[in-house]
Amino acid sequence: MFVSLKRVLSWPQLLALGAAGIIGTSWAYMNTRFYSIYGPGGVILGYAIGTLMAFLVALAYAEMGSTIPKAGGEVAFVFPTLGPLGSFFVGWMFILSSVLAGAAFYVIGISLLLSWWLPSLYTIPIYSIAGVPVYLPALLLGITSAILILILNYRSVSLTGQAQLIMFIMLLLAGATILITALFKGSISNFANPSPFPQGENPLGLGLRFGLISIGYLSGFEGLPALAEEIKIKPRTFGLVIAGSVLVAGAFYMTMMFAGSLFVPWQQSYAIAHRGTIELMSRYSIWLGLIAWLASFLGLVTSWIPTVMTTSRMVFALAREGLFPSQFERIHPKYGTPTIALIFVTIISIIFGSLGEQGLIWFLDISGVGLGTCWLLSTLSMILTRRKYPNIPRYFKVPAGYLVGILGSGITLTVILVSIIPGTSLSLVWPYEYMILILWIVLGMIIYPFAKRRMNKLGIETVARNLLGEYYDVIYGKKEAKTETK
């Protein structure tokens, strides 16, 4: 039976979920390290290149997400061209990148951030992973925080959207404070003297190298199509928000990278401030340091919320398709949220988050493969959908769509290859990261035949109608879809 979610999210809330979900915390504590390698010029140029690359991919998501705006995003819109296997695989890899590198990362990362004020979090070691201890207070804090995020997502989509929007505005205000402080307290000579690029390095080469790194920090927009059945905006506006969230996040990154380079000579910044902007701001005032820390904290929380939110909708859609157990389809009668899927995502994130800081490194590295796979299948899906179903309504039609799709596919394939091919600067670490990736793929291969058996019992048309809803008839040419507007 087809079940649906509540339409409550406005476009500002959706933009907050997308842009803040991308921003995260790396800009606040990694900037001085980036300066020491690439120079502030290389970092800013790299973010500009990374933003452009991510934007090309986001355009494909915008077109497909607004053409087939159903819960699960990629799981739904790749189905007509790539079938059940492609739909399952993109969902499976989305869960890999979102649960392991997203939700599990935040279980660990919240303690790292709060240890600035509570160093006692890193006492009472209870076990070690690859020689790195896991501490009881830090683990308990991560678990408690994960449960609080679950409760927020569980109780109300509307409340979650409102909370996200408020925190996003606070994040922007904190960012503005950092920029103003840098302009008045810092100096442009710290950025430009003698050059914003390391001596003897090619600026474009630096930008391209950091661009490949920065694209990983520009992920998060791909989760927005999963919320398609919870928006109360026109499909075209939906597409604009998906694409626009990348531009907003990219602009924020570049602004913060510029601001951070004004405080001290960039060549010395990493030696002076290992912890990045927080430490740089603290040199002037404990209150300014607190604002920088708050911005970092808000970045973490506003990334965590949409990660859990969108991944649970992906699980929900896989259940609707018949590829996951039907229990994951359950929607709370009062709150209108996929409760079992939310609980499942939280439990898995806590389990993997319990691997501690070493796990954090593994998860971040592996996420590039999962993320790149989702991006690749989605950009290919746009190309194939245009060829196979040229007459379906496209409310956000990308100009030069085939060219954008080809460029986006090339970018995403590069992201995958630089991760899995040994010897590159972004290669996975042997043996742990390759083993985790292989085990995840093998687990999916084991699960899929059982899932396919259930799908066959339901019937492929029933499954497709459950997944695509009213868009089933649009895609297969039986009638026009109803435009989903407020």
Image: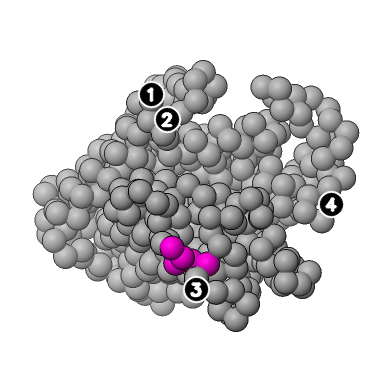
Amino acid type at circle 3 is: Ile
Q: Which is nearer the eye, 418 or 313?
A: 418
Indicate the position of residue 118 as horizontal and vertical percent values.
Answer: 84, 52
Disc 1 versus disc 3: distance between alpha carbons? 40 Å
Residue at image location 59% in from the left, 64% down from the top = 264
Mark in the foreground, 1 or 3: 3
In the structure shown, which secondary structural element does the residue marked by tag 1 occupy?
A: loop
Mark 2 sits on what residue? 427
Residue 411: horizontal and vertical position, in percent?
Answer: 27, 45
Give left or right: position of 430 versus 242.
right
Instruction: Please name the residue shown 55% across and 74% down the image.
Output: 187
- Whether residue 300 is visible here, answered yes or no, is no
471 on left or right of 178: left
User: Dot 1 surroundings within 10 Å: few (below 14), some, or many (20 or more)?
Assistant: few
Q: Please, what secondary structure does the residue beneath circle 3 have?
A: helix
Q: Which residue matches tag 3?
A: 188
Q: Which residue is mark 1?
A: 422
Give the magenta part as a residue range.
190-194
Q: Position of residue 150 (x, y in %)?
A: 68, 52
Q: Residue 238 falls in which quadrant of the image?
A: bottom left
Task: Answer whether labels 1 and 2 touch (C-beta < 8 Å).
Answer: yes
- Type of amino acid at the residue the image marks with label 2: Ser
Which of the image's four quarters has the C terminus? bottom left
Q: CA distance from mark 3 to mark 2?
A: 36 Å
Mark 1 or 2 closer to N-term? 1
Q: Is residue 339 found left or right of 400 in the rendered image?
A: right
